[in-house]
Image: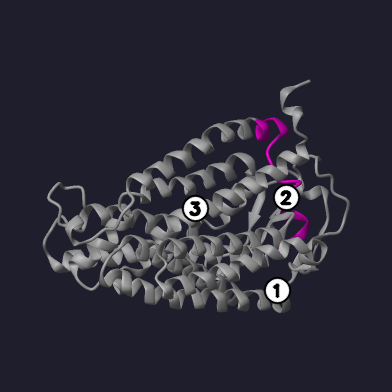
Amino acid sequence: MILHELIDYEILRLIWWLLLGVILIGFAATDGFDLGVGTLLPFVAKTDTERRIAINTIGPVWEGNQVWLILGGGAIFAAWPPLYAVSFSGFYLAMFAILLALILRPVGFKYRSKRESARWRNNWDWALFIGGFVPSLIFGLAVGNVLQGVPFRFDPADMRIFYEGSFFGLLNPYALLCGLLSVAMLVMHGAAWLVLKASGPVAERARSYGSLAALGVIALFALGGIFLALGVNGYNITSEIDPAGPSNPLLKTAAHDGSWLANYGTYPWMMIAPALGFLGAAAAFVAMRAKWEVATLLFSKLSIFGIISTVGLSMFPFILPSSLEPNSSLTVWDASSSHTTLFVMLVVSLIFLPIIIAYTSWVYKVLWGKVDEGTVNDKSGHAY
């Protein structure tokens, strides 16, 4: 028996769909609070010292957290090549805007305190705000557009991809709603991190803004669900599809006349995901008001888990539907790499993913504790 045949192709595809979800949730739960702190920076910190306190809560960990973003891009490239090709080419300008914003973050960290000029530092603080807000918004915009369908198609002759959308076409009402939900979710998460790691007025202001963000998450998540039920058609497969068949999206037929909520009627247990999205945000609000520091962060992560899982479970088995030609839509069963590739990647992931998680956990343990005025004024040179 060939080694990769120990796991059925269908099971491997399902495992990699789950792993992609794990990586996306891991990114949002870790680097998400970095983005949230950047977005909150002009509002929770009024003096230079307070801003340095906020910055230094994430300064030692943001680079490690960003590993999840790189893992996500690598996983999509290797496990779901058509998804990588369509999304990274079709959303090129949006991706470029995210990269430009993320580039501002390390530059801002390194350069803002190099000069004593208040104007210099203020400009870099706004750069850090852009580095947090813009990716948070665009990630949500992307999810909103994916739920509505992306305007692409495959040429049946040679499987070339044609994308017929535009950057401004991404800025539609439902996508903007999802973008605002993403910003609110990550602001809530960033505030939870500041409540845990910062001290003094920074933590108190973060508690106030985080409480408002948590209420915003509940309202926007509910509004998004209502909009999805009443104003956005889902996709459904209208032909037989072989879960272990070849990776060719055009071998099936699909229609844009279904409902993204249909899976919840078929599999009622999936209701756990949106319930966790709501309950996590509500619990984060209560924990912030009660000044439960660790619990606030954990509940915020729970809400993130529920919200992202809701999107994945609602769309299953679709991973990128096509609004231009529904038959070209990508699904879990027809957009993956080969059986052998998925198996080799799974073995590698089972080796290195636990190492990444263990190392990350160790770093957080070593860096545990509050950041205060004494920390940022330490003359050792380690603080930003």
Q: Say few, some or many: other residues with alpha carbon within 10 Å of mark 3 (under 14 / 14 to 19 / 20 or more).
A: many
* Highlighted range, magenta: 323-343
Q: CA distance from mark 1 to mark 2?
A: 27 Å
Q: Is residue 321 at least partly visible in the picture?
A: no
Could you tell me residue 252's position as x and y percent? 83, 51
Above or below, 330 against 192 in this view is: above
Identify residue type, mark 2: Asp
Q: Amino acid at mark 1?
A: Val
Q: Earlier in the sequence, mark 3 or mark 2?
A: 3
CB of mark 1 within 8 Å of CB of mark 2?
A: no
Q: Residue at x 53, y 46 (%)?
A: 73
Of residues 134 and 53, which is closer to you in this image? 53
Q: Nearer the viewer, residue 248 or 77?
A: 77
From the viewer's perspective, is the residue at label 1 or at label 2 nearer? Answer: 1
- The answer, for residue 349, to whether it is visible in the render is yes
Image quarter of residue 153: bottom right
Residue marked by disc 2: 155
What secondary structure is found at the residue carrying circle 2?
A: loop
Marks 3, 2: nearer the viewer? 3
Whether 257 is among the magenta residues is: no
Q: Answer few, some or many: residues within 10 Å of disc 2's Cα (few below 14, many 20 plus, some between 14 and 19).
A: few
Q: Earlier in the sequence, mark 1 or mark 3?
A: 3
Mark 1 vs 2, N-terminal side: 2
Q: Which residue is mark 1?
A: 232
Q: Position of residue 1 (x, y in %)?
A: 79, 20
From the image, tell me which residue sits under label 3: 27
Task: Give how far across and how far down residue 42 sits, in percent.
Answer: 29, 71
Element class at badge 1: loop
Vertical placement of residue 107 versus 289, above or below: above
Relative placement, left or right, of 113 versus 265 is left
Asked if 338 appears above or below 155 in the picture, the reply is above
Distance from Cα at disc 1 to Cα at disc 3: 27 Å
